Amino acid sequence: MFVARHIVRRAPLATKTIIFRAQSTVPKVVSPKISAIVNDISKLTLLETSELISELKEKLNIPDVAMSAMPMNAGPAQAAPVEEEEVEAKVEKTLFNLKLESFDTKSKAKMIKEVKNLLGLSLVDAKKFVEAAPKVLKENMPKEDAEKLKATLEGLGGKVTLE
């Protein structure tokens, strides 16, 4: 049975309430096997404890915690963004946003129908979309699909850019 008692005392000159809690009167039950393991581990040196942890991680397939998340000093943390920018500059862009810049007024109806089919909009929403040009039609499209769609829309009299 767990017994907890709360004793409240007020200090004579202070306005804070201090609460003391009595510990459980029921002794904690630990299996003899666990107790023996704890006793053996407590006798190990620091080096032996480190080896024990390594062996347990290997045996139980526990991954190491990434230490790179914790910055050791400011030097490498400042250098990292520069390297990331260089890598981004070298990587060829593969995903594009397709943007309708403008359209020929003679082919407005054809453009509205194509946008309606492309985006799955109602006729009224497609008309509002086309009239609101310049506006992004699709985002994160692969280069091949974006170029095909661009050619189709330009064939209908629209001016389209890939961003």
Image (spheres, grey):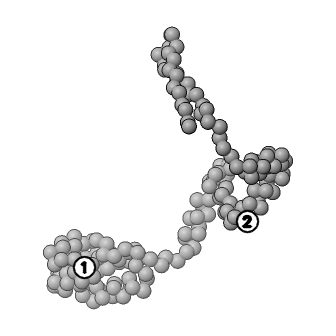
Dot 2 alpha-carbon crowd within 10 angstroms: few under 14, some 14 to 19, many 20 or more: few
Lateral position of residue 147 relative to residue 59, left or right: left
Please name whichever residue, 132 or 10, is drawn nearer the observer in this view of the structure. Answer: 10
Tell me if I can see residue 75 in this picture.
yes
Q: Secondary structure at mark 2?
A: helix
Q: Is label 2 or label 1 in front?
A: 2
For the point 50% across and 15% down, which residue is it?
10
| Above or below, comparing residue 25 to residue 116 in the picture | above
For the point 64% across and 52% down, which residue is it?
70
| Above or below, comparing residue 12 to residue 90 in the picture | above
Please name whichever residue, 95 or 131, is drawn nearer the observer in this view of the structure. Answer: 95
For the point 19% across and 81% down, which residue is it?
112
Q: Place residue 103 in its image quadrant.
A: bottom left
Q: How far apart, in angstroms, are the residues tagged by discs 2 and 1?
A: 54 Å
Which amino acid type is shown beneath numbered disc 2?
Answer: Lys
Image quarter where the C terminus lies is: bottom left
In the picture of the structure, the residue carrying the numbered disc 2 is 59
Which one is earlier in the sequence, the residue at label 2 or at label 1?
2
Lateral position of residue 26 relative to residue 111, left or right: right
Which amino acid type is shown beneath numbered disc 1?
Answer: Gly
Dot 1 alpha-carbon crowd within 10 angstroms: few under 14, some 14 to 19, many 20 or more: few
For the point 39% across and 85% down, which residue is it?
145
